[in-house]
Image (cartoon, coloured by chain):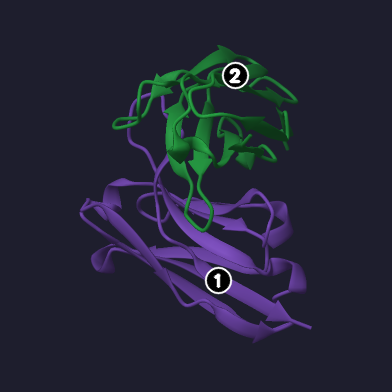
Chain colours: A green, B purple
Amino acid sequence: DIQMTQSPSSLSASVGDRVTITCRASQSVTKYLNWYRQKPGKAPELLIYSASTLQSGVPSRFSGSGSGTDFTLTITSLHPDDFATYYCQQNYITPSTFGPGTTLDIK
Amino acid sequence: EVQLVESGGGLVQRGGSLRLSCEASGFTFSSYWMNWVRQAPGKGLEWVANIKQDGSEKYYMDSMKGRFTISRDNAKNSLYLQMNSLKVEDTAIYYCARLQLEPHSEAFDIWGQGTMVTVSS
């Protein structure tokens, strides 16, 4: 199975800050890397698919980049709604696997 | 409104069985691969299984093969997960999720609200 890692595991920031989360795959997943945001007590929601494509309806402050094994999610100008846990996911090879998550909280 | 609604969770003893359901609405259910994903309390997301549009292909996480069975009824717009020989470590929220139809996408674009399964020892 492809192992996914994320860094940092947690991050403190303030409203208006810019943050970057990194995701690494144990082998190439080409561009099939997705990012989700999960607010407490809620289901995950898709933010970015295919490494860099913004899902319809998702604010443009979210962006993704990378290919192969190394990927980043960047959030510019944090909103209060963004304090949540972020997961990357590869769905290039079955079984699909998720990263362990990055929890973003308010400084 | 595009929606997935899970049901069937509950408390079950170790070794018992449970059948989860996921009812779809607001889209053509039969056009999509569907997935189950779970999340143990306070933990991350774990993919469980998926099923092709017509049910002809099914895939499972290794740890669930032989114990869990995914199925669907397109006439009822419903997805199912039959879980047998349940273990305490199967305790989790179980989500159904739709695989997006966008070209070059392998992402889950619609998720249900989840149903909680608790396996007691």
Look at 55% across and 81% down and name the residue there: B10
Q: What residue type is labelled 2?
A: Thr
Is residue B45 among the parts visible in the rendering? yes
The residue at which mark 2 appears reads as A72
Residue A53 in which image quadrant: top left
Q: Is residue A77 above or below residue B57?
A: above
Look at 45% across and 27% down and name the residue there: A49
Is residue B83 among the parts visible in the rendering? no
Which is more toward the observer, B111 or A18? A18
Residue A95's tag is none
Look at 61% across and 18% down and name the residue there: A71
Packing grade of label 1 (10 A; few <14, some 14-19, many >=20) is many
Q: Where is residue A5 in the image (x, y as percent from the top left)?
A: 73, 31
Q: Position of residue A22 (x, y in %)?
A: 66, 22
Q: Where is residue A106 in the image (x, y as percent from the top left)?
A: 59, 37
Q: Is residue A75 above or below residue B80?
A: above
Residue at the far right in the pictured view:
B121
**With A44 as the anchor, is B2 left or right in this view?**
left
Residue B116's tag is 1
Q: Position of residue B52 (x, y in %)?
A: 42, 49
Q: Which amino acid does label 1 sit on?
A: Met
- The quarter in which the C terminus of chain B is drawn is bottom right
Q: In this view, does A55 lie above or below B108?
A: above
**Under tag 1, what secondary structure?**
strand
**Under tag 2, what secondary structure?**
strand
Chain hosting mark 2: A
Circle 1/circle 2 CB separation < 8 Å: no
**With A18 as the anchor, is A46 left or right in this view?**
left
Packing grade of label 2 (10 A; few <14, some 14-19, many >=20) is many
Q: Distance between the residues labelled 1 and 2?
A: 32 Å
